Amino acid sequence: RLFFCRTLGKDAETPRPPRAPPSSSRAPARQTAKGLKMPTHAHKNRKKRGHVSAGHGRIGKHRKHPSGRGNAGGQHHHRIMMDKYHPGYFGKVGMRHFHKQKNHYHCPIINLDKLWTLVGEEKRLECAAASGQAPVIDLTDYGIFKCLGKGQLPKQPVVVKARYISKLAEKKIKEVGGACILTA
């Protein structure tokens, strides 16, 4: 842009000097220990200044915990909500088991589709080549107590030793010409 300079005594056109960038009176977000902190002017609360209840109403009032903290009142003033959306939340079912020891119930399982992974693919092919021989897979050596019948076995006989073997697993093992041996 051009402007007329009257100080030279004549109307001379000279270029206007570059303008400085406008200074912003608004502070940008600043870094704090917890992360970026939004500047106060950007909070929605600024618009509510001068309005007595700040959008929360005069009658109900914005109080701390009007219906109790957490799950309070599930059997009292929140009973309808608990019965409707969380039936069976309160009460007990079944019997107590005093002095329960987890090792009495320890029974790791394996399915038939993972059975051959214990000995490996090389061993399986080796046994398949040698006719008349079936490998013995003792599951208790691998810390497994029970054999279940999910999946398919390759058409090759195998002897499975385990504490427990399900009916379906036994049926599938015998279909491929294998055998099941129960151990104590």
Image (spheres, rainbow, N blue to C red):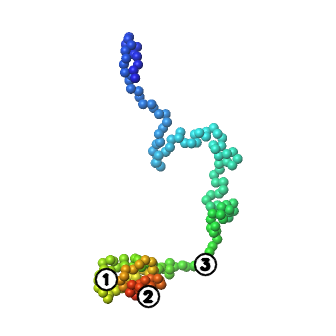
- Pick whichever, 90 or 15, lies toward us: 15
Which of the labelled discs sits on residue 15, or is there none? none
Label 2: which residue?
A: 182
* Image depth: mark 1 or mark 2 in front: 1
- Pick whichever, 99 or 110, lies toward us: 110
Answer left or right for 48 relative to 120: right
* Image depth: mark 2 or mark 3 in front: 2
Mark 3 residue element = loop
Residue 87, image x, y percentages = 64, 67
Which residue lies at the image location 66% right of the left edge and 65% below the top edge? 83
Label 3: which residue?
A: 95
Answer left or right for 96 relative to 151: right
Residue 160 seen in this snapshot: no
Amino acid type at circle 2 is Leu
Residue 11 seen in this snapshot: yes
Mark 1 residue element = helix
Amino acid type at circle 1 is Ala
Label 1: which residue?
A: 128
User: Compared with residue 13, is residue 91 higher up or lower down, i.e. above or below?
Assistant: below
Q: Crowding at label 1, few (<14), some or many (≥20) Cα neighbours within 10 Å?
A: some
* Image depth: mark 1 or mark 3 in front: 1
Which residue lies at the image location 39% right of the left edge and 13% below the top edge? 11
Residue 45, image x, y percentages = 58, 42
Between the C-alphas of marks 1 and 2, the distance is 24 Å
Which residue lies at the image location 68% right of the left edge and 63% below the top edge? 79
Amino acid type at circle 3 is Met
Q: Quadrant of residue 72?
A: bottom right
Q: Crowding at label 2, few (<14), some or many (≥20) Cα neighbours within 10 Å?
A: few
Can you say which quadrant of the picture contains the C terminus?
bottom left
Please report whichever mark, 2 or 3, sits nearer to the chain's N-terminal start. Answer: 3
